Image: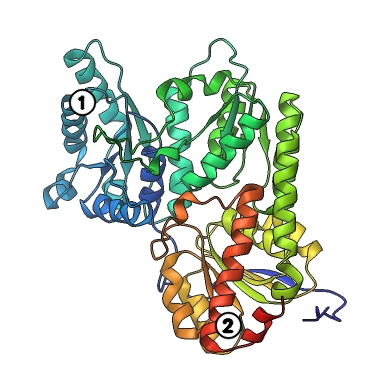
Amino acid sequence: MPCEISDKSVAEVKIVSKKRAGIINPMYDCQPAGAQYAGIGVKDSIPLVHGGQGCTMFVRLLFAQHFKENFDIASTSLHEESAVFGGTRRVEEGVMVLARRYPDLRIIPIITTCSTEVIGDDIEGSINVCERALKKEFPDRQIYLAPVHTPSFKGSQVSGYDECVKSMIKTVAKKGAPTGKLNVFPGWVNPGDITQLKYYLSEMGVDATLFMDTEDFDSPMMPDKSIQTHGRTTIEDLQDSANAKATLALARYEGAAAAAYLEEAHNVPNHQINTPYGIKNTDDMLRKISEITGKPIPDSLVRERGIALDAMADLAHMFFANKKVAIFGHADLVLGLAQFCLEVELEPVLLLIGDDQGSKYKKDPRIEELKNSVHFDMEIVHNADLWDLERRIKKGEIKLDLIMGHSKGRYIAIDANIPMVRVGFPTFDRAGLYRKPTIGYKGAMELAEMTANAMFAHMEYTKDREWILNTW
């Protein structure tokens, strides 16, 4: 299959917002959803969502669909009376009930919602009341209460995650003796990605703490029937984040605010890099870790890189060259996947990002890198929804060979008869994706092979160019 090089002298990369005011088939959830995901990433933590029961129930359902596990999240369960007279008493009652029922509880992120932000509940004032009550009833316990302001009428699950991570760090971090450790903020990634990052750090001999460590969201079924579905990040980890050697933020919109706070408040040097999707971004991450810590990159990782390169080379020119791709989801994921696509000769012509931070996105260096790399037109739509993708396909404005995104876009792919690679949150119509990495060298290989297999299956069922599969 020959590679078609565009004869255009200049490719156009446009960053636009969707033209409609409303949202049709959203690709993101609300801010409180992201805050809850960050909150369950800490051991001995139970987020308390200050709002209606649905603000908790439907988010827990998403987590259960994605991870096939159950998570403890509490609700103040507001009703009409609270909407009229205020709901701060529900916060105070909720905190005390959690403290009494869970003797190992050490932190409660108190997460606001649209209703409680609109009625103007004083969360910080409620926390002061709760802290006095906790000290009186439990004088020997320290339970941290972190205020997390996440009105759902602005932002998204991405900004909610960012806000909760920052609030917990701000509430708990405490200056003390230097630890020599490296803080790592991976962003919104899967347990498989956390396992992969830990492997890299271990191979390099780097002592690091991951915020949030969600490896145990892939929970084992143990003989003693114990439940281990919880975050591994501890209160002590949060405290010592202020005493680290440096911070490495792997996502610009998911956890980077906490990294910036640690630098500003506690003089912990902050290093921001691209999320390590694909080969180049992973190279950059390992080089940065080596630069910060002085640890060399071992041969084992060089070999893993070589295996990934070989696997990707086997697929790129023969099957991927000039295939048009649409990607939707979190900005860090979408931009990282676009960079990965270019490495394997796929052409990401449409990038859909589901919240309105256009001014930030226009300054994102990854977009500048894409502008300098592509030889085809690319459109980046922020504040987008899945109807933006569906409309373009139905009207023939775009012809796609592949869609990449989470499971909520599956009906678009089915109706348009376009192969789809499931990646992002939530993914629930393919088994075990949460335990497979998408970052790092191994993640790049997994992504390439998932992409190829999706295209191969499509060729077989549509009888479209299936003869290519027999040429090897």
The answer to which of 355 and 320 lies nearer the viewer is: 320
**Callout 1 secondary element:** helix
Q: Which residue is found at the position 54% from the left and 45% from the top?
A: 193
- Residue type (three-letter) at the residue carrying disc 1: Ala
Residue 57 in percent (x, y) is at 24, 53
Q: Mark 2 packing: few (<14 Cα in 10 Å), some, or many (20+)?
A: some
x, y percent for residue 328: 54, 66
Q: Is residue 17 visible to us here?
A: no
Left or right: where does residue 254 sit relative to residue 129?
A: right
Is 56 positioned to the left or the right of 451 in the image? left
Q: Please count the marks in the image.
A: 2
Say which mark, if any, is on residue 459: 2
Q: Is residue 311 left or right of residue 125?
A: right
Circle 2/circle 1 CB separation < 8 Å: no
Find numbered disc 2 in the image and state the secondary structure of the residue it sits on.
helix
Reply above or below: 163 against 425: above
Which tag, 2 or 1, sits closer to the chain's start? 1
Q: Which residue is more in the foreground, 91 or 332?
A: 332
Q: Quadrant of the N terminus?
A: bottom right
Is residue 201 visible in the rendered image? The answer is yes
Circle 1 residues within 10 Å: few <14, some 14–19, many ≥20: some
Label 2 vs label 1, nearer the camera: 2
Image spot of residue 62 (x, y percent):
33, 56
Q: Residue at x 36, y 41 (%)?
A: 219
Can you tell which mark lies on residue 99?
A: 1
Examine the rendered structure and indicate whether residue 458 appears above or below residue 365: below
Q: Amino acid at mark 2?
A: Met
At x 55%, y 50%, the residue is 437
Q: Quadrant of the C terminus?
A: bottom right
Residue 270 circle label: none
| Nearer to me, 470 or 241 | 470
